[in-house]
Image (cartoon, grey):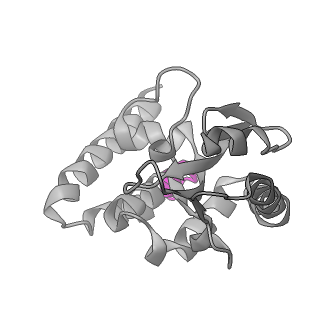
Amino acid sequence: MYIKELSKGIKIKGFKKNSLTWLCQCDPFVYMFRIEPGKYCDKNWQYYTLEIGIYSSDVFALCWGKVPKGKSVKNTDCCLRGSISDFFQENGDIEFYEDVDVKELQERINFLIEKDIIPFFNKIKSFEKLYRIMLFYEEKAIQQELHQIYIACIEYVMNKKNDALIRLEKINNQVWKKKAQEVIMRMTNKQLSAENN
């Protein structure tokens, strides 16, 4: 299959490969690069999107009340994620069809990794930097309310507790309001626990 052949030729220094995902642990984050399969594929035509993401166990635990089991972080675990076209002026789509030049695709992806992706990750080494990026990409977020919840969790980690609570209280979407309230409870319980110790 083309995708397996393609993925073998993608090299990202410092990243470990797991199937179509590459991860790099660089405290306090895990950086992710992924080739995401498209929803509408058949045996004659396959479609993939190049995705990047940033995962924080502190943010994930505040949001969801747990951390992923094992060492593998999924793209859906990332507080910041999206197609590379969301972050750079590059098309992050890959199509496989008859006579596709896999070597050419490998070269294109490796070029994007060196030119855009690694420098992007290198800029985000602190919660302050992640916070600024999260605010900058608010409008492009896959799920707006969840993005706001993640920003609030980052604010809490950065000791901007009042800002975090105000942001969460503003979420009134039926689906996400309950999640926002859960996060407020976790933050309040953490605060009370810290004060009692």
Residue 96 in the image: state x and y as whole percent. Answer: 58, 57
**Visible residue check, residue 162:** no
Task: Place residue 175 in its image quadrant.
Answer: bottom left
The answer to whether 59 is drawn above or below residue 108 in the figure is above
The N terminus is located in which quarter? top right
Q: In the visual, does 119 lie left or right of 131?
A: right
Task: Place residue 190 in its image quadrant.
Answer: top left
The answer to whether 138 is drawn above or below residue 10 in the figure is below
Q: Residue at x 33, y 39 (%)?
A: 186
Residue 123 in the image: state x and y as whole percent. Answer: 78, 61
Residue 21 in the image: state x and y as whole percent. Answer: 62, 40
**Visible residue check, residue 149:** yes
Residue 108 in the image: state x and y as whole percent. Answer: 78, 63
Task: Place residue 86 in its image quadrant.
Answer: bottom right
Q: In the visual, does 78 lie left or right of 148?
A: right
Which range of residues does the magenta coloring cover?
154-162
Q: In the visual, does 20 lie left or right of 15?
A: left
The majority secondary structure of the magenta stretch comes to helix
Q: Residue at x 13, y 61 (%)?
A: 174
Q: Residue at x 60, y 72 (%)?
A: 85
Q: Single out the residue that lies furthest toward the left.
A: 174
Q: Which of the two residues, 175 or 24, is positioned nearer the viewer here?
A: 24
